[in-house]
Image (cartoon, coloured by chain):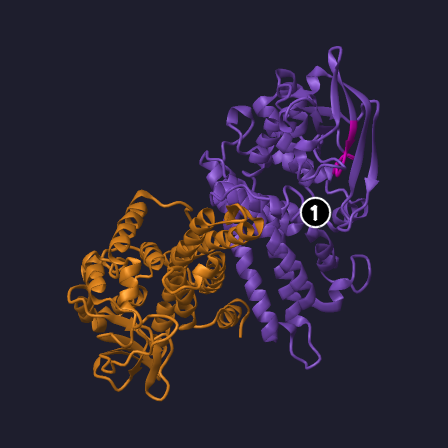
């Protein structure tokens, strides 16, 4: 409870309209001030043991932080992303990685972008083609990565590379931490429907020393699996975002009057729609709590995590569609125009939402996971 | 709120899982149709302390919480047990809250195995219409005007239909046992009982849905078409996943609502949310489960149809999902 109060107070103070405007204009969901404020409080490492700088909390105790961040739109996803790789380094990193790289990530001084998808491989991530070949004491990387979000502000890209083309695809991969300052590294801006910036990143004969390798050679798929499992211990921001959207829609509906003089909130159809959303918001929050609680108990919440992702992101599609209907034409106006309401949140959420059922494992991938690992159904196509 | 069951709670689940598996087989459930009441099951259920689990021990109950009662209700729902577990449980708790006038009747149920139920809607023109178990009840609580009455129903003509809950009309002119409360007190008592009913019925519907889902999963693993188990077709697997996810969500919500009522929360919204979501989920789950059975699912001898009919009837006897959402909206945002 205390963390929720503190987090809300912090975000209210530092996530100013200026910050939100900067994020919207650049499309980069990161703000150094927000990042460092979180780093100073050590909230993203609160679950580490005290002798490593943490507080020994479990994921359940940190959950309110993400709920509040979702509610207020705090742009900390870049830092969160970075810390997933940070967690991996903490577990499997070399001495050098853990003493030289990791502290910079924890302090919020360096960001890591994820370089997994390629133009030809999204859901089929193991089909990655970007090559890494031995070159003396290091490696030479060549290829492209798609949707390398945060690459424009990141110090590193965590790259999934093919080191062995002669074995089954998921057995010939290795992960590397590639500095964005490397010669031969470049990026191209990719504008999106949601306004978030992403990038294609190009690796043209990029040399990295072997110290940049994360995990054993040809063990990259296990590294990816570790990162995914770590992500399940983190409370998602989607429930908080949906809760905030509902609050804002209700606030609007209380004062907006329809042609017949009734408030929008008095309309029985609107009331029914909003009540249903209140329910699915709560169900999503509970599913997320269950996942984090399972993880906190030391069990790997594969099915729980997939159910949470599937349910909350699919529910979000319904939420943004319905709430834009409820708010009406005023909701179409983007932030910056005089008639915008709620800082243009409804139209922005409508444009952002489709990403959530795609990124981090599509709904269809999640359903396959739940079907096999959860219901015991045979593998399907 | 804790998310996992402690050892006592696990023991309750284990005990009533075993009890209902033994006493409420599909054969027994079918035998009780079309009325839907099995008197010997009811007596056995009383004998193992089911309906009284959440009544204070000094009144002859198990001294447990509403959450404990919800755990029992889920098991009852899994087996479609043809007995008024939920209605009796909340009615007994209401009698306990009016112990000075209602307390004496508790023993008639917990020791005498009389059938006790609750009219979910107030009477109109002297009749509480289509009360669950009204056709077999020895005792019924009904709100008549501004008086909350405990009566002895005399009418014994069950209304048979989609469900099997011995629906029957209860007349407010039936022999009065005692007036439990009047005026604002009466309304407060009934509202509390109805919130508890919502929570326990939500738990029962979750049990029902979960079992229907299990039947479907088993069927699609075994049934082969086009040379492979039909569960390997994504169209079916993905549909089952969506309802399985909703069932898990409904379970969490029902237990959160039970916990909140036990914790003394004044907020009534969780009970309403739990009922609406469980009712919607149960109907969608059984529809999906039945559909996955193909032509066999439509046969009377396959059990999934028993679940499909009750998923709807157990809920509609109180209200539609949409009606419940209107109620929820008024609690969230005023009239």
User: Main SS type for the magenta part?
Assistant: loop
Magenta range is A143-153
Report which quarter residue A107 is drawn in: top right
Q: Residue B251's spot in the image, x, y percent?
A: 43, 54
- Residue drawn at point x = 56 percent, y = 51 percent: A311
Chain under numbered label 1: A
As for residue A283 lying within the magenta part, the answer is no
- Residue in the foreground of this view, choosing between A272 and B286: B286
Q: Is residue A140 above or below residue B11?
A: above
Q: Report how many numbered discs are placed on residues in the image.
A: 1
Q: Is residue A146 left or right of residue B308?
A: right
Q: Is residue A188 left or right of residue A10?
A: right
Please name the color used to draw chain A.
Answer: purple
- Residue drawn at point x = 72 percent, y = 38 percent: A33
Residue farthest along the bottom direction in this orientation: B125
Residue A19 in sight: yes
Q: Residues within 10 Å of mark 1 (few under 14, many from 20)?
A: some
* Callout 1: SS: loop
Q: Which chain is orange?
A: B
- Residue drawn at point x = 31 percent, y = 59 percent: B26
Residue beneath disc 1: A15
Residue farthest along the left direction in this orientation: B112
């Amino acid at each position: 409870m205390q963390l929720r109060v503190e987090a809300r107070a912090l975000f209210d103070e530092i996530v100013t309209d200026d910050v939100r405007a900067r994020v919207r204009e650049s499309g980069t969901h990161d703000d150094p001030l927000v990042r460092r404020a979180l780093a100073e409080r050590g909230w993203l490492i609160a679950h580490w043991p005290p002798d490593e700088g943490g507080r020994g909390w479990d994921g359940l105790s940190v959950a309110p932080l993400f709920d509040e961040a979702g509610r207020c739109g705090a742009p900390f996803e870049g830092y969160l992303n970075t810390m997933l790789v940070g967690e991996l380094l903490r577990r499997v990193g070399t001495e050098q990685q853990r003493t030289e790289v990791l502290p910079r990530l924890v302090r919020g001084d360096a960001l890591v972008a994820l370089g997994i998808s390629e133009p030809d491989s999204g859901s089929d991530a193991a089909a990655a083609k970007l090559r890494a070949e031995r070159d003396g004491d290091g490696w030479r990387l060549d290829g492209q990565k798609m949707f390398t979000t945060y690459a424009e502000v990141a110090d590193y890209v965590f790259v999934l590379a093919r080191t062995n083309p002669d074995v089954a695809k998921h057995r010939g991969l290795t992960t590397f931490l590639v500095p964005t300052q490397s010669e031969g590294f470049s990026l191209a801006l990719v504008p999106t429907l949601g306004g978030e910036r992403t990038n294609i990143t190009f690796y043209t004969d990029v040399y990295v020393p072997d110290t940049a390798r994360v995990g054993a050679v040809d063990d990259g798929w296990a590294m990816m699996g570790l990162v995914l499992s770590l992500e399940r211990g983190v409370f998602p921001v989607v429930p908080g975002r949906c809760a905030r959207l509902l609050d804002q829609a209700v606030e609007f509906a209380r004062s907006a009057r329809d042609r017949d003089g009734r408030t929008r909130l008095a309309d029985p159809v609107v009331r029914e729609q909003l009540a249903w959303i209140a329910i699915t918001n709560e169900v999503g929050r509970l599913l997320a709590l269950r996942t984090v609680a399972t993880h906190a108990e030391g069990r790997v919440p594969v099915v729980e995590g997939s159910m949470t992702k599937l349910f909350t992101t699919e529910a979000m599609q319904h939420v943004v569609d319905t709430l834009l209907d409820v708010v009406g034409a005023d909701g179409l106006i983007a932030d910056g125009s005089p008639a915008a309401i709620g800082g243009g949140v409804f139209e922005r959420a409508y444009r952002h939402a489709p990403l959530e059922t795609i990124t981090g494992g599509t709904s269809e991938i999640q359903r396959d996971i739940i079907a096999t690992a959860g219901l015991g159904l045979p593998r399907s196509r | 709120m804790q998310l996992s069951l402690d050892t006592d709670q696990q023991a309750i689940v284990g005990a009533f899982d075993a009890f209902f598996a033994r006493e409420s087989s599909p054969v027994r459930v079918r035998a009780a149709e079309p009325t839907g009441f099995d008197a010997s099951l009811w007596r056995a259920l009383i004998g193992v302390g089911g309906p009284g689990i959440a009544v204070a021990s000094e009144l002859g109950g198990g001294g447990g919480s509403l959450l404990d009662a919800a755990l029992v209700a889920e098991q009852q729902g899994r087996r479609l047990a043809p007995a008024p577990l939920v209605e009796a449980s909340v009615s007994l708790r209401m009698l306990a809250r009016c112990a000075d006038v209602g307390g004496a009747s508790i023993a008639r149920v917990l020791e005498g195995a009389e059938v006790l139920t609750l009219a979910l809607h107030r009477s109109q023109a002297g009749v509480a219409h289509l009360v669950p178990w009204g056709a077999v009840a020895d005792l019924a609580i009904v709100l008549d005007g501004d008086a909350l009455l405990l009566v002895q129903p005399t009418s014994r003509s069950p209304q048979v239909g989609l469900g099997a809950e011995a629906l029957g009309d209860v007349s407010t002119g039936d022999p009065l046992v005692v007036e439990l409360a009047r005026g604002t007190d009466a309304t407060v008592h009934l509202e509390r009982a109805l919130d508890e009913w919502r929570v326990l019925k939500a738990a029962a519907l979750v049990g029902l849905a979960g079992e229907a889902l299990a039947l479907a999963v088993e069927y699609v693993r075994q049934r082969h078409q086009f040379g492979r188990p039909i569960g390997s077709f994504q169209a079916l697997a993905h549909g089952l996943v969506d309802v399985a996810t909703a069932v898990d969500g409904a379970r969490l919500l029902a237990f959160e609502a039970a916990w909140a009522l036990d914790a003394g929360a004044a907020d009534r919204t969780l009970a309403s949310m739990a009922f609406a979501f469980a009712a919607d989920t149960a109907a969608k789950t059984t529809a999906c489960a039945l559909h996955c059975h193909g032509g066999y699912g439509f046969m009377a001898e396959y059990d999934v149809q028993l679940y499909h009919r009750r998923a709807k009837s157990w809920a509609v006897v109180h209200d539609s999902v949409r009606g419940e959402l209107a109620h929820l909206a008024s609690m969230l945002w005023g009239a």
